[in-house]
Image (tube, rainbow, N blue to C red):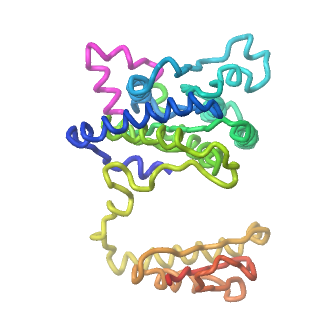
Amino acid sequence: MFESAELKHKLSDEEYDKEVPALREALLDAQFDLLEKKERSLLVIVGGVEGAGKGDTINLLSSWLDPRYLDIHALAARSDEERARPEYYRHFRRLPPKGKIGIHFGSWHTMPIVEHAFKRTSRQEMDAQLARICQMERILVEEGWVLLKLWFHLSKEQQEKRLKKLGKDKEQSWRVTENDWTLFKMYDRFAKVSSRALRETSTDYAPWHIIPGADPNFRHITVGRAVLSALKSNGEAKPAEKALVLPTQPVDGVHMLSRLDFSKKLAKKRYENQLNELQGRLNRGLRDKKFADQSLAIVFEGSDAAGKGGAIRRITPAMDVRQWKLSASGTRRISRVQPCWLRQRSRR
């Protein structure tokens, strides 16, 4: 889920300086338009790994906006009073009123992630918490709040480099605590749990936006554009009809497809050995009793002559012909569902 954010996104100082003036002006115009109409409010939820620039970015954003109409809250551990209250009490009491922007460091997503990462709750318990979160967020959106959920991300290597750099800086070393290094040792566990939590709670009415945190210039502009998009979104649209999404093209033009390494090769003998092994695993999986209660849909998409047909021909020999159906169609209508279904989507 985080692969795209771990690419080396970068924006030069010249590009950044060129972008900022117009973006700041547009943000202020949109903020005062929100304030004047008072039809809805914007809640920005900030989460992510330590050292990814959450604080720096929000500090800068507050200087780009009018701070008089901006409420910022950092939610730490719950107080005794909050523990005695309903689950989302501490969040509801801090929701921004209509016409204002609220920014919350930490949110209702934090506790399910942390508790499961430390193995204090089971996966089923976390999934139940995430399901309640989706229901609650739908209610908020239907009542007039626009939710912008930002997850600041660093790869494991990037985070280690960032923490070491801050720790060596006499003026910035206070930012790095012993707890930061404790959490770093659990990076893989947290990444796995966070990835699941984000997938389960990223909906059409309240999607997550993953912000690459390594380059400050890229991070600042990306967040500024996200906030601007949220401020300009149509608050009257029903959640199921319109999703708040960022432009698909990153600020620097870098994306997963642009970074694919087409020079990679596999020796013929190694290829044949791995193909036989994987076909055997696939066949055994399809014959497993557990699969009798499931179905599988495989969708192939991509450029012409990229190997979609060849990939299908590598899979089908491992399956019982009675189990699958191949459909090469540009339509989305499924007339029949088999236990295992392969579908190659053709271009028109």
Residue 109 in the image: x percent, y percent? 63, 34
Query: Going by the picture, which residue comes out furthest to the top?
Result: 80
Q: In this view, does 6 lie above or below 17?
A: below
Q: In this view, does 242 lie above or below 146?
A: below
Residue 301 in the image: x percent, y percent? 50, 74
Magenta span: helix, strand or loop, mainly? helix
Q: In this view, does 36 lie above or below 93?
A: below
Query: Going by the picture, which residue comes out furthest to the front?
Result: 36
On whether residue 87 falls in the magenta region, the answer is no
Q: Residue at x 72, y 42 (%)?
A: 138
Residue 228 in the image: x percent, y percent? 47, 39
* Residue 228 seen by the camera: yes
The segment highlighted magenta reads: 160-180
Q: In this view, does 176 lie to the left or right of 244?
A: left
On whether residue 169 falls in the magenta region, the answer is yes
Q: Which of 268 and 341 is in front in this view?
A: 341
Q: Nearer the viewer, residue 23 or 178?
A: 23
Q: Nearer the viewer, residue 35 or 189?
A: 35
Q: Which of 333 and 262 is in front in this view?
A: 333
Q: Is residue 145 left or right of residue 17?
A: right
Number of labels in the image equals 0
Q: Is residue 24 above or below residue 202?
A: above
Quadrant hosting residue 102: top right
Residue 326 in the image: x percent, y percent? 63, 85
